[in-house]
Image (tube, rainbow, N blue to C red):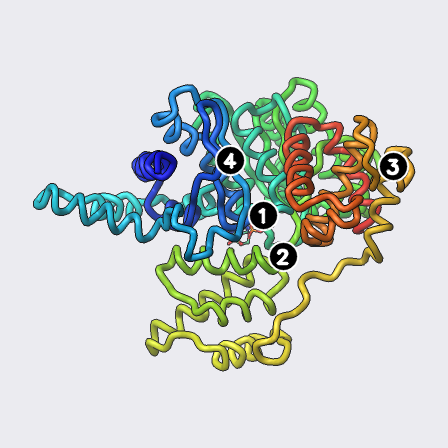
């Protein structure tokens, strides 16, 4: 009872600080599983929720909880689908709860401005740049590091994660992150000189400077920059002179500890058509990759984007789209927009046969109606390959990695292996536990979380994981 009471108070505090829309999307259902004077553990419904709550709302939740638990030092989140079980009464269902609160508020103070109209006003004055902000950026396991790295850079440009190299296939959110970082740094560091450009624009700028013989001025401009963000660097391929110019700029900025962030559609070692010395430079940059969202994440992305548009997709339709539109976020957005447009014209809610027809028209190959594709193919043959690769990298035998010995030299390779099986192979925690000497679900979950946490702190380890990953998936 006490727990339930505290939970409700905490949730009310949260509602006071986060946007209503975010509250509905990200909190959805929440409960407390453990509470003492120093720590609260929350249960949430999926790892998607957990990642987002940790990444975006940790401070809001912590502060809200601290108002109720004075000596609080730590909060954490654990995924448990049991929270969806209707017999579980200790759960706050956010939508219902918000309604309850609205009702009591209304009956208390009729006549006053209610909060909804206030919110409306705020959202309608959004600036154009808000298209790329963090509250609409969805975090999943394979973009989390890129997200955290950008966040760290925004907090302290030039200090950590420098120079930062973000790579990933098209339409997976590189520009979204870079533009957000750009806006954020401008807002926070008003006295810094920040340049965001694309490699394409840089080439044009360079060519025109050469023509006008004003190359010195261009050099001067870039030398004075505090933060240089260059998107889509792949356009530099075969442009040797521009590459050289950029090489010199990078060197100057790096030597004076200025922040550099670039995005590329491939990993440093794959950069053909690039000056060897520039390529070898990139190899020691801090690299983070963005990978494709898996089925569960695609489903969540669709539902969240639909909700942001105040559009309802039936569950079976959402699952069908998530199963068949697998490549990237932009295509998910595109299909969703088509559904919304159709709905606005005809007021027909999407049904499975209609959406199957639509996807066919948009030239997606779909499986038989309603069936769900097996999530994500990878080129890796088996989990054994992964564990052996990790073992080779750290110089440790397979058996030690999957075994029980808790010495530190075995723990890291073990956690790295589990993490790769989870994020790259999409194994369940149970299956991983089974491979690693029959550990239980919670132990594997703990190890994966621990590693994720370490990766954010330890750039050396991040480098190790990148090397292993690149040696297998490219
Ligand atoms: P890239 O630069 O990698 O090609 P973009 O940043 O242009 O990809 O992303 C393509 C579209 O998908 C954009 O509309 C972007 O807002 C959206 N998008 C990508 N990643 C995410 C994400 N994690 N959360 C929400 N929207 C995303
Ligand atoms: Mg882009």
Q: Is residue 240 left or right of residue 167?
A: right
Q: Circle 1 is placed at which residue position? A: 140
For label 3, the SS is helix
Q: Is residue 235 visible?
A: no
Find residue 465 and report its horizontal and vertical position in percent.
76, 38
Nearest to viewer (mark 1 / mark 3): 3
Mark 2 to mark 3: distance in Å? 30 Å
Find residue 104 and report its horizontal and vertical position in percent.
18, 45
Choose between 125 and 70: the one closer to the eye: 70
Q: Which mark, by number, is residue 72?
A: none
Which residue is at a point 37% across and 50% down the rendered structure image? 93
Nearest to viewer (mark 1 / mark 4): 1
Q: Is residue 434 left or right of residue 211?
A: right
Nearest to viewer (mark 3 / mark 4): 3
Pointer 2 or 3: first along the chain: 2
Nearest to viewer (mark 2 / mark 3): 3
Q: Which mark, by number, is residue 400?
A: 3
Disc 4 crowd rating (10 Å Cα; few below 14, some 14-19, many 20+) is some
For label 1, the SS is loop
Mark 1 to mark 2: distance in Å? 9 Å
In the image, the residue with mark 1 has its CB under 8 Å from the nearest atom of ligand 1: yes
Q: Is residue 435 above or below residue 413?
A: below
Q: Is residue 410 above or below residue 388?
A: above
Q: Which mark, by number, is residue 294?
A: 2
Q: Circle 4 is placed at which residue position? A: 182
Which residue is at a point 68% across and 23% down the rendered structure image? 254
Check contact, mark 1 vs mark 2: CB within 8 A: yes
Pointer 3 or 4: first along the chain: 4
Pointer 2 or 4: first along the chain: 4
Mark 2 to mark 4: distance in Å? 28 Å
Check contact, mark 3 vs mark 4: CB within 8 A: no
Q: Is residue 286 visible?
A: yes
């Amino acid at each position: 009872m006490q727990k339930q009471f505290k939970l409700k108070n905490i949730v009310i505090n949260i509602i006071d600080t986060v946007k209503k829309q975010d509250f509905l999307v990200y909190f959805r259902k929440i409960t407390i599983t453990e509470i003492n004077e120093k720590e609260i553990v929350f249960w949430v419904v999926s790892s998607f929720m957990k990642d987002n709550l940790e990444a975006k709302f940790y401070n809001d939740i912590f502060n809200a909880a601290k108002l109720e638990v004075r000596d609080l030092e730590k909060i954490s989140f654990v995924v448990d689908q049991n929270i969806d079980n209707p017999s579980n009464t200790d759960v706050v269902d956010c939508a219902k709860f918000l309604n309850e609160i609205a009702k009591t508020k209304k009956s208390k103070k009729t006549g006053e401005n209610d909060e909804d109209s206030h919110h409306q006003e705020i959202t309608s004055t959004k600036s154009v740049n808000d298209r790329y902000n963090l509250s609409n950026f969805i975090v999943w396991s394979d973009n989390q590091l890129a997200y955290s790295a950008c966040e760290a850079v925004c907090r302290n440009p030039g200090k950590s994660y420098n120079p930062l190299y973000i790579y990933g296939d098209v339409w997976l959110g590189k520009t979204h992150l870079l533009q957000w970082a750009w806006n954020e740094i401008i807002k926070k560091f008003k006295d810094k000189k920040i340049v965001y450009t694309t490699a394409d624009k840089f080439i044009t700028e360079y060519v025109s400077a050469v023509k006008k013989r004003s190359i010195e001025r261009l050099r001067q401009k870039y030398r004075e920059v505090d933060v240089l963000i260059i998107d889509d660097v792949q356009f530099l391929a075969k442009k040797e002179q521009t590459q050289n110019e950029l090489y010199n700029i990078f060197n100057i900025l790096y030597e004076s500890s200025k922040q550099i962030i670039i995005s590329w559609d491939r990993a440093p070692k794959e950069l053909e058509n690039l000056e060897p010395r520039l390529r070898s430079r990139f190899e020691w940059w801090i690299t983070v990759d963005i990978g494709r969202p898996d089925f569960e994440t695609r489903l969540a992305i669709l539902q969240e984007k639909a909700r942001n548009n105040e559009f309802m997709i039936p569950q079976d339709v959402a699952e069908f789209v998530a199963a068949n539109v697998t490549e990237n976020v932009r295509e998910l957005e595109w299909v969703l927009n088509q559904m919304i447009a159709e709905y606005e014209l005809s007021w027909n809610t999407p049904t499975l046969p209609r959406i199957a027809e639509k996807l066919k028209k948009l030239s997606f190959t779909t499986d038989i109606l309603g069936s769900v594709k097996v999530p994500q193919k990878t080129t890796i043959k088996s989990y054994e390959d992964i564990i052996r690769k990790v073992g080779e990298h750290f110089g440790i035998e397979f058996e030690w990695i999957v075994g029980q010995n808790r010495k530190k030299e075995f723990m890291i390779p073990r956690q790295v292996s589990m993490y790769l099986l989870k994020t790259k192979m999409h194994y369940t925690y149970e299956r991983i536990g089974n491979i690693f000497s029959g550990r239980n679900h919670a132990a594997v979950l703990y190890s994966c979380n621990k590693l994720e946490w370490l990766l954010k702190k330890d750039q050396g380890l991040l480098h190790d994981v990148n090397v292993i990953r690149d040696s297998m998936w490219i």
